Amino acid sequence: MDVYNVHERLLPVKASEAGALIDSLASDGDLLWPRGSWHPMTFDRPLSVGAVGGHGPVRYRVAAYVPATWVRFTFSGPRGFHGFHEFAALPASGAPAGGDRSVLRHTLAMAARGPARLTWPLFWRPLHNACLEDGLDRAELACTGTVARPARWSPYVRALRTFAR
C-alpha cells in the first residue's frame, strides 16, 4: 500500500520565520511539535543529519536538513513503514519572494508493507492526522498568537488514545 499524506498551514510570516519553527524541533524551545498532547519528538543529539530518534513507537533518523527551510526523516519503525516524512517552509503561492506569507507543510510518503498495511489505516493514520493538525495549531499560535480554527480530535482518535494507554 502506497501512502502519500500532506498537512499544511498558511501562515502570515516569511518562509524563513516558519522555517525557524522547523529548527526548533525536539529542542527545549520546540514551537512546532505538540509534545504536551503527544509523545515528544526526541533525538540522540540536536537536530542535524544523522540524528536518530522519533516520537513514541515511531522511529526515524534525520536524512536531510536545510536550516530554516526543510527537514526529512526516514523511518526505521514501526515495522512495515518504508519511506519518509518531512517538514518544509515554503513561500505561499502568489506571494513575492521574501513576502509575508508562507506555507508550513508536512509530507509523509511511504510504502506500508506487512502489518503496516492494516495498522496504518486503522491505527496510525488517524493518530498521525490528529498529531499533525495539533502541531500546525502550535505553529499558527507561535506565529500569530492565536489559532483561528483549532483542530479537534474525532471520537475515533479519542478512543484510540484511550486504548493505547
Image (cartoon, helix red, strand yellow):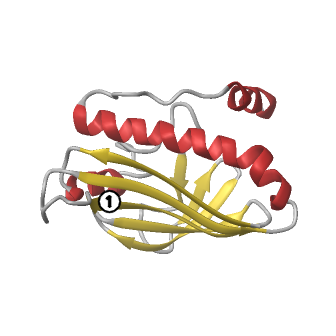
Determine if residue 34 is in view: no
Residue 119: x percent and y percent?
81, 52
Q: From the viewer's perspective, is 113 left or right of 53?
A: right
**In the rendered image of this protein, does residue 47 appear above or below residue 38?**
below
Amino acid type for the residue under numbered disc 1: Ala
Residue 84: x percent and y percent?
58, 68
Bin the neighbour count of mark 1 within 10 Å (Cα to Cα): few under 14, some 14-19, many 20 and up. many
Residue 74: x percent and y percent?
59, 70
| Residue drawn at point x = 37 percent, y = 66 percent | 70
Determine if residue 118 is in view: yes
Secondary structure at badge 1 equals strand
| Residue drawn at point x = 13 percent, y = 66 percent | 97
The quarter of the picture where the N terminus appears is bottom right
**In the rendered image of this protein, does residue 132 appear above or below residue 52?**
above
According to the picture, the residue beneath numbered tag 1 turns out to be 89
The quarter of the picture where the C terminus appears is top right
Q: From the viewer's perspective, is 134 left or right of 146?
A: right
**In the rendered image of this protein, does residue 125 appear above or below residue 68?**
above
| Residue drawn at point x = 31 percent, y = 33 percent | 141
Which quadrant would residue 87 be assigned to in this image? Answer: bottom left
